[in-house]
Image (tube, helix red, strand yellow):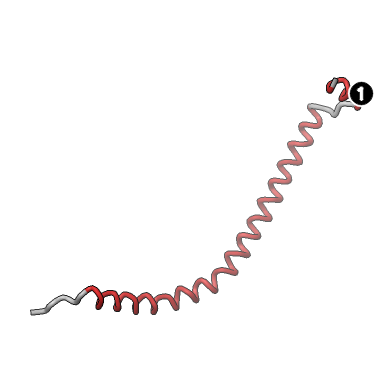
């Protein structure tokens, strides 16, 4: 009759399996990291450009709706 292995045997087997599987995981991480960094940088630049365009449109709309006040009017508002 087969007797089960104790916990230390299973811990050793799982440790060996983990070490063997970490080699391909490490290789994948080293190859994918630069690709992901480049993708994130390109995505961020595109998002920033889009945000700047949106803010410029909003600024021009607000400047048209609410023109700047003169220095005299500004002093009057502060007083």
Task: Tell me the quarter of the image containing the N terminus.
Answer: bottom left
Q: Which residue is labeled 1 in the image?
A: 72
Query: Residue at left 34%, top 76%?
Result: 15
Query: Residue 39's quadrant in the figure?
Result: bottom right
Query: Residue at left 56%, top 68%?
Result: 33
Residue at the far right: name it.
72
Query: Residue 70's quadrant in the figure?
Result: top right
| Relative to 20, residue 44 above or below | above
Q: Mark 1 Cα within 10 Å, few/some/many (few <14, many 20+)? A: few
| Relative to 58, residue 30 above or below | below
Query: Residue 55's quadrant in the figure?
Result: top right
Tally the numbered discs: 1
Question: Mark 1: which secondary structure?
Answer: helix
Report the side of 18 relative to 60 (left or right). left
Residue 49 horizontal/vertical position (percent): 71, 50
Residue 62 horizontal/vertical position (percent): 77, 31
Report the side of 7 relative to 39 (left or right). left
Query: Residue at left 75%, top 39%?
Result: 57
Report the side of 34 relative to 72 (left or right). left
| Relative to 49, residue 42 above or below | below
Task: Tell me the quarter of the image containing the C terminus.
Answer: top right
Residue at the far left: name it.
1
Residue 56 horizontal/vertical position (percent): 76, 41
Along the line of sight, the residue nearer the viewer: 76 or 58 = 76
Report the side of 74 relative to 44 (left or right). right
């Amino acid at each position: 009759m087969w007797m089960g292995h104790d916990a230390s045997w299973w811990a050793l087997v799982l440790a060996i399996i983990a070490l063997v599987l970490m080699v391909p995981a490490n290789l994948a991480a080293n190859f994918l990291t630069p690709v992901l960094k480049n993708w994130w940088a390109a995505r961020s630049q595109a998002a920033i450009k889009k945000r700047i365009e949106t803010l410029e449109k909003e600024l021009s709309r607000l400047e048209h709706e609410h023109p700047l006040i003169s220095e005299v009017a500004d002093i009057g508002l502060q007083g």
